[in-house]
Image (cartoon, rainbow, N blue to C red):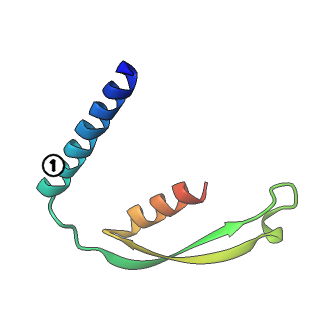
Amino acid sequence: MRDLIVAAAATVILLYATQAQADGMTKTDLKSFKVTIRVFDPTKGLESGQDYVLPVDSPDAEHAIASTTANAA
């Protein structure tokens, strides 16, 4: 029971900290980018793949590519 109370308290603290951080953050202007990724079988080479164009709202092109690559992985 004690572990459950500690976990609940930690969750409330985490939610409060997240909300406090969100309230203090400045709004970033986002731009639309179209990021192309290729999904392929590495044993068959790049030609075996298919391209996907994904719409991404991001502050800049570098972030759009990095976040899309990380999410695709």
The image shows residue 39 at horizontal and vertical percentages of 71, 66
Q: Quadrant of residue 14?
A: top left
Q: Quadrant of the N terminus?
A: top left
Q: What residue is at 23 percent from the left and 73 percent from the top? A: 29
Q: Is residue 23 left or right of residue 41?
A: left
Q: Is residue 47 above or below residue 21?
A: below
**Which residue appears farthest toward the right when viewing the image?**
44
| Residue 41 shown left or right of residue 2 in the figure | right
Camera-side residue of 62 and 58: 58
Image quadrant holding the C terminus, namely: bottom right
Given residues 69 and 2, the one toward you in this image is 2
Task: Name the residue located 20 percent from the left edge and 51 percent from the top edge.
Answer: 19
Q: Give the quadrant of residue 42.
A: bottom right
Compared to residue 5, the image places residue 62 above or below, namely below
Residue pointed to by mark 1: 20
58 relative to 21 in the view: left or right? right
Label 1 is placed on what type of residue? Ala
Q: Residue at x 24, y 47 (%)?
A: 18
